[in-house]
Image (cartoon, rainbow, N blue to C red):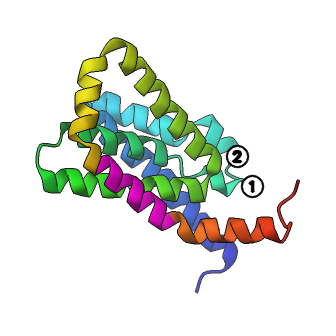
Amino acid sequence: VLDPHKSTLVIVLINVFLSCFIMYLLLRVLKFDLRISTILSLVYGFAPFLSYRINGHYTYTPLYLFPLTFLLIYKFILAKKKKEKSFLASVLGFTLAFTIMSNFQYFISVVFSILFYLVYLTFKKRRPLVLFLKRNFGYLLLSATVFSILLIPWLVQVINLIKQNEIVK
C-alpha cells in the first residue's frame, strides 16, 4: 500500500502524463506535424505554470482537462453517426462535471473560452452556428443532463454547507 506522499506523487505524474498525451492527441487531430505536436505537447505538459505550483497545489495538475474538452468538442463537430455523437456528448458532460469538481477555476476558464468562441461565431458565422445548434440540440441536452446528474451529490454538499454556514463568507 502506498503512503499518502507516494500516492500524491503518482497522481501528479499521471496528470502530467495525461496533459502531455491529450495535448498531443489534440494537435494530431488538428493535423499538426508529428514533431511539432510532440514538442508542443511536452511544452504544454511541463509548462512553468504547472511545474512551479506542482509542489503544493495539486489541484492545478489536471491541466489535461483543457485539451480534452476541446478535443471532445472538435470530434463532436466532425462526427456524423448518431452513436458517436451521443457518446461524445456524454463524455463531454462527464468531462465538464469532472472539471468543475477537480478545479473550479479551470471550469470557469473552459466555460469562458467556449462562450467567447460562440460569440465569435455569432458575428462571423451566425447561420451555420444556428443550424448546428438546431441539428445538435438533443445531443447538447444529453451533455447537459449527464453534467447535471453527475453534479447532484456535489451540489447537495454545497447546499448543506451553505445551510450550516460552513462556507467562509
Q: Read off the residue under disc 1.
A: 56
Of the residues shown, which amino acid type is indicated by label 2? Arg
56 and 140: which one is in front? 140
Residue lying furthest left: 81
Q: Are marks 2 and 1 in contact (CB under 8 Å)?
A: yes
Gap between marks 2 and 1 measured at Cα: 6 Å
The answer to whether residue 32 is seen in the rendering is no
Q: Position of residue 137 (x, y in %)?
A: 28, 44
Q: Secondary structure at mark 2?
A: helix
Q: Which residues are magenta?
A: 139-150
Task: Tell me which residue sits at (28%, 35%) in the image.
Answer: 133
At label 1, the amino acid type is: Gly
Q: Which residue is mark 2?
A: 53
What secondary structure characterizes most of the magenta part?
helix
Relative to 125, is 162 above or below? below
Above or below residue 100? Residue 111 is: above
